[in-house]
Amino acid sequence: QVHLVESGGGLVQAGGSLRLSCAASGSIFFINAMGWYRQAPGKQRDLVARITNGGSTNYADSVKGRFTISRDSAKNTMSLQMNSLKPEDTAVYYCNLQNLMTRNNYWGQGTQVTVSS
């Protein structure tokens, strides 16, 4: 089993910055990807950014140039630096870890990010 704990999030004004962190523990297969997804009220959960254990990244078009994902694979931690935040970034953000061999997904409990205009 894999356990993910998120930290960060909160309320910020438009144009501001926040940093989300996620720590993974448990039976973590070394070939994996970690990522952040977000879900706004009434909408589906969408990918924000993702990074593999090899360092390959991909971002949603809406956050490119504003958000940066990073990870420390030795410590099984991941961060998302969010700059130039917009009201449309408001959502619950979820940490995700995917075993790239089995495709099993694990989720954190979610953390609220609210951007005021």
Image (cartoon, rainbow, N blue to C red):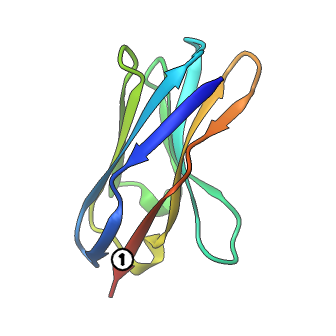
**Above/below status of 16 relative to 100:** below
Residue shown at 49% from the left, 23% from the top: 25
Residue shown at 27% from the left, 59% from the top: 18
**Above/below status of 37 relative to 87:** above
Question: Three-letter amino acid code at disc 1?
Answer: Val
11 or 117, nearer to the observer: 11
* Image quadrant where one finds the C terminus: bottom left
Q: Residue furthest bottom?
A: 117
Residue shown at 56% from the left, 44% from the top: 108
Residue shown at 34% from the left, 67% from the top: 10
53 or 63, nearer to the observer: 53
Q: Residue 82 location in percent, x, y?
A: 32, 57
Q: Residue 56 location in percent, x, y?
A: 47, 27
Q: Mark 1 points at which residue?
A: 115
* Image quadrant where one finds the N terminus: top right
Residue 3, picture quadrant: top right
How crowded pointer 1 is (Cα within 10 Å; few <14, some 14-19, many 20+) is rated as: many
Q: Residue 11 location in percent, x, y?
A: 31, 73
Q: Classify residue 52 as left or right of residue 13.
A: right
